[in-house]
Image (cartoon, grey):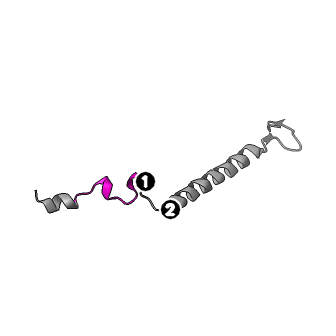
């Protein structure tokens, strides 16, 4: 192998984000994405837990069983 072939080989040290060398802008972007995902998940979880499905089985002529979780 030639020395030039070894210099062109990929390695983790050649990646600009490796070993804490990432830019401040990239770090902030990742933080913002994580925070937005957490907020979206919290809102979705809140809406899912507070919604009560209408599980009434029956009609006005023949009343059924009310199985909603109150």
What residue is drawn where x is 54% and y is 60%?
Answer: 28
What residue is drawn where x is 37% and y is 60%?
Answer: 16
Name the residue tied to disc 2. Answer: 24
Q: Is residue 47 magenta?
A: no
Viewer-nearest residue: 35 or 14: 14
Q: Is residue 56 above or below residue 24?
A: above
Rendered-image quadrant of the N terminus: bottom left
- Residue 22 lies, in percent from the top left, at 44, 59
Dividing the picture into quadrants, the one containing residue 10 is: bottom left
- Residue 65 lies, in percent from the top left, at 82, 35
Residues at marks 1 and 2 touching, judged by CB atoms closer than 8 Å: no
- Residue 55 lies, in percent from the top left, at 77, 41
Viewer-nearest residue: 52 or 35: 35
Dividing the picture into quadrants, the one containing residue 2 is: bottom left
Name the residue tied to disc 1. Answer: 20
What residue is drawn where x is 87% and y is 39%?
Answer: 62
Segment tinted magenta in the rendering: 9-20
Label 1 neighbourhood size at 10 Å, few (<14), some (14-19), many (20+)? few
- Number of marks present in the image shown: 2
């Amino acid at each position: 192998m030639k020395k030039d072939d070894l210099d062109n080989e990929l390695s983790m040290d050649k990646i600009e984000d490796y070993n804490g060398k990432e830019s401040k802008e990239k770090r902030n972007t990742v933080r913002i994405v994580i925070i937005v995902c957490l907020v979206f998940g919290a809102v979705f979880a809140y809406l899912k837990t507070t919604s009560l499905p209408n599980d009434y089985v029956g009609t006005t002529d023949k009343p059924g069983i009310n199985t909603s979780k109150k």
